[in-house]
Amino acid sequence: MAHEDPGKEPSWKADFPIESKRATHVSRREFAKFLGLLSGAFAVSNGFIVLRAMAFPPEKLEGEQFVANVEDVPVGEMFQFEVGEEKIIPYILIHLEEDQWRAFAQKCTHLTCAVRYSKEEKKIECPCHNGWFSADTGAVLQGPPPRPLPQLEVVVRDGKVYVKEGES
Amino acid sequence: MSNFRRSQNEAHPNKTNTILTGIILLQILFISMQIWFLFGALNNALEENFGFALTTFIGSLLMAIASIWLLRYIPEPLQKRPTKKPEVSPSRDP
């Protein structure tokens, strides 16, 4: 057993002081130790994100999925549909012009509000925080969304509209 | 008994203060950057940016190690020398 300095208060006694003033007082040494612990907790949280991304990779849409008939979605209108089996993701199909179709995820990349196509503006609008996306590319035009909307490729064949995963 | 360390500490009492403040400021700097990394990783990991999540994790881990390693250099609090109890020689006993 290590020899202890007789003039120094033992650790067990310092941790459970008798005076309430000493019990509630947080010294700078203790604060620094707490910051070390907090820093470790942040690193662990960041590691959790990595583990989660490794454990649950995003599922890709396999093959083509039927969405709607061409005559059901007039020019300038949008049609809501869903993709995915285990994890259902809402998407919107937009009939921009004759023979011009786009499909974007309906969840805004800011705080996952449902976005909608504005026929007057010819842009995609998120009404929650006034975010705007390009109806052509899904890129952010204005507002708080940090990323463009995820996009699916649209295939029109025999009067039917299908979506599939993009090449990129 | 006095030694060089005790004499230094008594001659420069502000040094302990400066070291402790410096350590706390460095830790706050590391933690601020870790919050920034975590926010970025949360925002990006959701969108298939695995490389970003991994890079921020490595950075965050290094900063956590640095924050904990800095705790080694926390100075001991300056304590007053324990007052010596008056020694009573047996010869003075009544």
Image (cartoon, coloured by chain):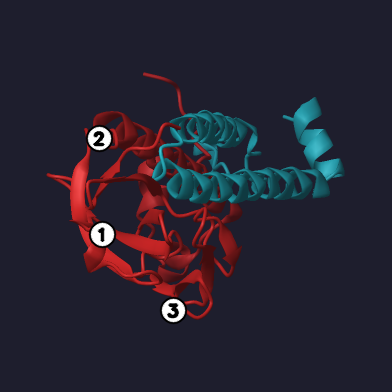
- On whether disc 3 and disc 2 are found on a single subunit, the reply is yes
Distance between the alpha carbons at the discs numbered 1 and 2: 35 Å
Residue placed at 33% from the left, 68% from the top? A78
Asked which secondary structure carries label 1, the reply is helix
Circle 3/circle 2 CB separation < 8 Å = no
Q: Is residue A107 visible?
A: no
> Label 1: which residue?
A70
**Is B83 above or below relative to A68?**
above
**Can you give x and y, in whole percent of width and height, for residue B90 in the image?**
49, 37
**Is residue A9 left or right of A162 when viewed as pictured?**
right
Sequence-wise first label, 3 or 2: 2
Circle 1/circle 2 CB separation < 8 Å = no
Farthest residue, direction right: B11
Residue placed at 36% from the left, 64% from the top? A112
Q: Chain of mark 2?
A: A
The chain shown in cyan is which? B
Q: Quadrant of the C terminus of chain A?
A: top left
